Image (tube, rainbow, N blue to C red):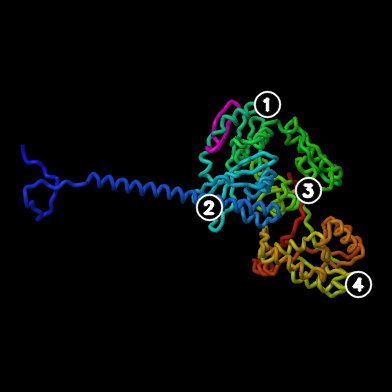
Amino acid sequence: MGPAIDFNWQSEGEAETNGSPPPQTSSGLSWLVAAIFILALLLGGWFGFRRWQENRLGDLQAELQLVLDLEREAVTAGDGELFRDLQTNDPAWIAAQLLPRNQAFNRAAREVTRAGQSAAEAWANVLWREDGKAWQRIAFFHWDGSQWQRSGGSADYWGDTKRYAYEWGVLVIPESDLIWRTLISRFIAQRLPANAPQLTVSLLPQDGPALGWETPAASDVQLPSPRFWGLDEKGQPGEPFWSALAALLQPRPAVLRFVAPDASLFRYLGLAQSFARDYLPPNYDLEIIPAGSLPSDPRLWLPQVDGARLTPDAALIAAGYVRDLTDLMQHDLQFDQADFYQQIWQAGWWQDRMWMAPGHAVMNLIFYNREAFRQAGLPQPQAGWTWTELTAAASQLSHPQPDGGRYWGITDIFADLVWSYGFSWGSGCVAGPCLPALTPERREAALAWYGQHAGAALPDVSRLDETARELAHLRWLTLQQAAMWVSSPVEYETELSRLSLGVAPFPLSEAQVEAGEKMPASRPSTSLAPSSARVQPIPA
C-alpha cells in the first residue's frame, strides 16, 4: 500500500521533530459548544423578536384604541372638525360614516382586541356591545405621516376578488370572506322568489350603503362585506348583514312614496303619472303625499318615504336622514348630468358627494327703486357694476327715519348677497361657465363683508328665523323702506306696478372687471357674476 494521506496540514518550515504521532484535537467538542452557542443566540433572538413584536403590537393596539376613543368623543360632542381629522380624505368613506349603523358604531364604547400592521396600513378587530349582545367588526387605519386615521380598507387584507356561479346567479366575494361563501349562497337560494331573474350579488371590500338594481332580465345587489356590518361572538355574520341581504332579495315595494309641497301638488301629480308611464315597471305605482299632511319636522317622516321636494341642511344630512345618491347616479345609465346647468348641479353636492337632485332653481336678481337713486344723485346700477359700487351706493342710500326705523340701502333675506360675494371674490372669470370653489378664504371674505356692513347699509337678518325674515321683507317692500332688494324675477310685474323699478344682476369683483377689460372686443365684456341659486332639490 502507498503512504497514508496526512490531513494534519503544516505550514512551510513546520517540520516534524520526531516520529511521534500528531496530538489528538478536540474538534468534535468545539463544534458542539459552537452549535449550542449559536442555537442559544438564535433562540434568544427569536424570543427577543417575539417580545419586541408583542410590545409593538401592544403599542399599535393602544394607538388605534386612542383613535376610536377620540372618534367617539367627537361624535358625542358633535365635533365635526375633530371627527373629519380622524378620517382619511376619502369622500365616499366619510359619507359612509353617516349611515345609521355606522353612527351607532361610532357612538359605542369600543375595544380593540387584536391589531395588525403592514407598512402604512393597519387593521383592528373591534369589540362592542349593543342591546346586551357582543359584536365585533373590522376597522382599518392609515398612517398619514403624523397620526393614524380611520380608512375604508386595505387591499392587502381582502385579497383577490373571486366569482362563483350558482343556479340563482353569481356571487362576487373577496378572498378574505370565502369562509362564508357556502353559507351566503344557501341563504340567497332559500330566499329568492320563484322565477326570479338571474342575480349577481357582490360583497364589497369597502363600506357604504346596500344597493340594488333591477331590470327585466337580471338584478344586481351590492353590499359591504359582513365584516363591516358586525360579526357575532362566534365570528359569523350577524343579524344586521342578513337582514340587509334579505331586504335586497325581496321584491321591491310596489308603491314609491314622494312628498311634494301642497302649493304644487297638482303639478307633481301630473309628473307622477308621466314618470310611472315612462319609467316604472307595470306593477309599480308612485304615490304623491302632500307635505302639509305630515309633521313639520322632516326627521319624523323621511325614513318612511322614498323622496321629497325638500332642501335639507348639512345637519339633516349628517344625522343620516338623507341618502348618498352618488353611486345610484353613477350606475343609472339614463341619468345625464348634462341636463343641468353646472351652477345648479353643484348645489346638490356636499363634501364631494351627491345628496340631492335639483328640481328647480330660482335665480334671484337685485331690484332697485329708480327714484331713490335719482333723488340721491347716484348712477343707476347696470350690468358690470362692482361690489365696491354696490356697497358705496347702499351705504349712501341708507339712513335713519323719524319713526326710529331705518331706510335701507339694500335688503336680502335669502343670503344671496353673501354667497355671491364669496363666489366672485378674487375670481377673474367673466366668460362662463364660472364655477369657482367656495374656499375658506372666500368664505371668510364674504362673512367679513357682511359683518362690516350689516346694520348700516343692509339689515342683519342672521338671527331671524324664516318666518320673521319673510315678514320683515314684506314690511320693507310695503312701506318702501329699501332702495334695493334681492328678489325673484317672478315678482317683477308686481313690483313694477307700484314704483319706478329697475333690475340689475349681481355685481362683479374687481378682478372680474379687470379681466373683462382685457378681453378682445369680439367677445362679451360682461357676464353674470356667480350668484347663489336657491335650489329646491329632491333628496332620497
Does the image show residue 522?
A: no
Picture quadrant of residue 143: bottom right
Q: What residue does disc 3 label?
A: 310
Q: Residue at 77% across / 56% down in the picture?
A: 363
Q: How many marks?
A: 4
Inter-mark Cα distance, 1 to 2: 51 Å
Q: What residue does disc 1 label?
A: 193
Asked if disc 1 and disc 2 are in contact, CB closer than 8 Å, the reply is no
Q: What residue does disc 2 label?
A: 59
- Comparing 105 with 23, the one in front is 23
Q: Position of residue 211 (x, y in %)?
A: 66, 39
The residue under label 1 is which amino acid type? Pro
Q: Residue at 67% across / 54% down in the picture?
A: 74
Task: Give the extent of the magenta segment.
Answer: 163-178
Instruction: Identify the mark nearer the N-term, 2 or 4.
Output: 2
Determine the secondary structure under disc 3.
Answer: loop
Q: Position of residue 479 (x, y in %)?
A: 92, 65
Inter-mark Cα distance, 3 to 1: 35 Å
Q: Position of residue 379 (x, y in %)?
A: 81, 72
Instruction: Identify the mark nearer the N-term, 1 or 2.
Output: 2
Asked if disc 3 and disc 4 are in contact, CB closer than 8 Å, the reply is no
Determine the secondary structure under disc 4.
Answer: loop
- Horizontally, residue 342 falls left or right of residue 467, namely left
Determine the secondary structure under disc 1.
Answer: loop
Q: What residue does disc 4 label?
A: 401
